[in-house]
Image: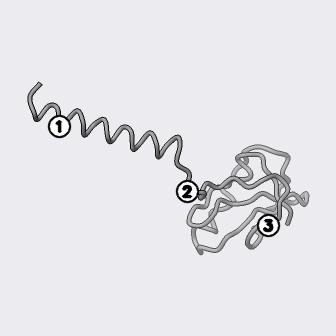
C-alpha cells in the first residue's frame, strides 16, 4: 500500500467511526417520542372522523407545515394525537398509535 492508499483507508475508517457513534451512541435529546396520554401540545386540528388507532388518511397535520404553529389532531370521538414537533408536520401520534390528552 502506498501513502495515498493508507491515508484514504484511515480517512474512511474515521468517517465510519464518527457515523457509527452519531447513529448508535450519541443522542442529543431532540428525538420526538411523546409518551401515551400526556398533554397535547399546540392548537387542535379538528377532524370529522373518529380515531381508533393506526394510520389514517388524509394528512391531518398538514396545516402545521403551512403556518408553522404546533398542532395536534382532535378526532370526532374525543381522542387526540400529537403532530410532529415543528418544523416537522407528520401525523406522528396517529402513525405510532400514541394518543395525547387535549
- Above or below — where is 22 with respect to 86? above
Nearest to N terminus: mark 3 or mark 2: 2
Residue positioned most to the top = 1
Give me the residue at 67% from left, 70% from top: 70
Dot 2 surroundings within 10 Å: few (below 14), some, or many (20 or more)?
Answer: few
Quadrant the C terminus occupies:
bottom right
Name the residue beneath numbered marker 1: 7
Q: Quadrant of residue 4?
A: top left
Who is closer to the viewer here, 86 or 80?
86
Q: Are marks 1 and 3 in contact (CB under 8 Å)?
A: no
For marks 1 and 2, the one nearer the N-term is 1
* Label 2 residue SS: loop
Judge left or right: residue 4 versus residue 64: left
Place of residue 15 in the rendered image (x, y in percent of width and height, measured from the top left)? 33, 42
State the separation of the CA atoms marked 1 and 3: 58 Å
Report crowding for label 1: few under 14, some 14 to 19, many 20 or more residues within 10 A (C-alpha): few
Kindly identify the residue that appears in the image at 82 percent across and 58 percent down. 100
- Residue marked by disc 3: 46
Where is residue 32? Give x, y as percent: 65, 55
Marks 3,2: beta carbons within 8 A = no
Closer to viewer: mark 1 or mark 3: 1
- Assess disc 3: are there few (<14), some (14-19) or many (≥20) residues with their C-alpha within 10 Å of its C-alpha: some
Q: How far apart are the alpha carbons under marks 1 and 2?
A: 31 Å
State the CA–CA distance, disc 3 to disc 2: 33 Å
* Side of 81 where 24 appears, left or right: left
Residue at 78 percent across and 57 percent down: it is: 81
Q: Secondary structure at mark 1?
A: helix
Q: Residue at x 59, y 75 (%)?
A: 67
Q: Nearer the viewer, residue 57 or 7?
A: 7
Mark number displayed over residue 28: 2
- Is disc 3 placed on a helix, strand or loop? strand
Amino acid at each position: 500500500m502506498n501513502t495515498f492508499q493508507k491515508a484514504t483507508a484511515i480517512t474512511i475508517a474515521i468517517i465510519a467511526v464518527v457515523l457509527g457513534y452519531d447513529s448508535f451512541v450519541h443522542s442529543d435529546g431532540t428525538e420526538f417520542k411523546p409518551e401515551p396520554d400526556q398533554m397535547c401540545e399546540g392548537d387542535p386540528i379538528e377532524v370529522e372522523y373518529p380515531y381508533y388507532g393506526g394510520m389514517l388518511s388524509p394528512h391531518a397535520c398538514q396545516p402545521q407545515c403551512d403556518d408553522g404553529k404546533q398542532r395536534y389532531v382532535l378526532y370526532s370521538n374525543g381522542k387526540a394525537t400529537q403532530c410532529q414537533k415543528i418544523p416537522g408536520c407528520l401525523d406522528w401520534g396517529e402513525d405510532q398509535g400514541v394518543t395525547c390528552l387535549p
